[in-house]
Amino acid sequence: MDITWLGHAAIRLRARDAAVVMDPTDKSDGNDMGRPQGEIVTVSHHHPHHDHVAGVRGEVMVLDGPGEYEISGIHIEGLRAALRPATNQDPAALRSTIFIFETEELRLAHLGGLSAPPTAQQAEHLSNLDVLFVPVGCDEALTPDQAARVTRALEPHIAIPIAYEPAKRGMPAALQTFLQQLGVTPEAAVSRATLNRRTVGGDGTRVMLLESRG
C-alpha cells in the first residue's frame, strides 16, 4: 500500500482495491491537498481542516462516526472520541472519531481529534497497530507531549506524525517536541511511503516522516 500526507491531518491510503482519504483539508489553513482520488473518505470531526469532502474526486463513501464497515476489502472501525472544548462551543461539535483500518494484512489508525489519552476501552481497540497517524499540532487535539505519551502507550510499529506546520528552516517546534518526548530519531522524510507486511515489524516504534503534499 502507498501512503501520502496531503497536508494538515489529511492522509491518502492507496490499497489494492480502493483509496481512502482521511480528514481531507480545505485551503483556509494554507494547505492545498489538490484533488485526490478516493473511494472512501473518513472525517474525524466536522471542521474545514478535517471534513473537506468536496475536495476528493470520485464517488465516495463518507464515514464520519462510530461503527464497523467493510468496503472494497478494507475493514474500518470508528471509535467515538472527544475534542478539547473551546469557549461557548456547541457540545455537538466536540465529537470526534478515531478510525482503525485493516487491509493487506496491516492494521492502521488515525487518531483524528483525540484530545486526551485513550480510555482503557479505546486502547484495547488500538492494540497491535502497525501504523499510527498521530496529529501533533492540532489546536483542538493532543498536544505534542500528549501525542508522544499516547504513542509510547500504544506501541505501534510505525508512528507517522501529522498536522504540524512545516518550517522553512530547521524542524517545526511541535514535531521537535514530539520526537524529544518520544525519544526516537526519525527516519529521513519521504514523499510517499510504500508498506507491506514484510517491511513492517521489529522491536520498538519507528518514526516515519512524510513530506506534505499540501
Image (tube, helix red, strand yellow):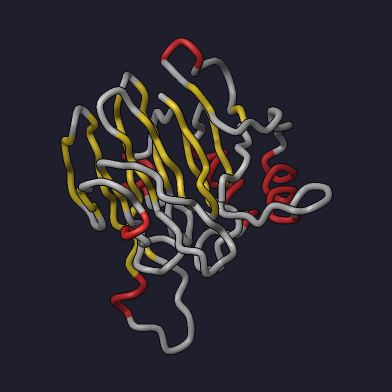
Q: Residue at x 40, y 84 (%)?
A: 89
Tell me residue 198's x, y (percent).
46, 10
Instruction: Please state if 79 lies on the left or on the right of 111 as rendered.
Output: left
Q: Residue at x 40, y 54 (%)?
A: 23
Tell me residue 62's x, y (percent).
23, 53
Quadrant where the N terminus sits is top left
Find residue 25 and report its image quarter. bottom left
Residue furthest top in the image: 198
Q: Nearer the viewer, residue 51 or 135?
A: 51
Residue furthest right in the image: 169
Tell me residue 79's x, y (percent).
28, 51
Q: Residue at x 73, y 31 (%)?
A: 185
Instruction: Please state if 161 lies on the left or on the right of 46 as rendered.
Output: right
Figure disc tally: 0
Task: Work out whether 96 lies above or below 11.
Answer: below
Task: Work out whether 24 lies above or below 207.
Answer: below
Q: Residue at x 34, y 42 (%)?
A: 37
Task: Work out whether 164 lies above or below 180.
Answer: below
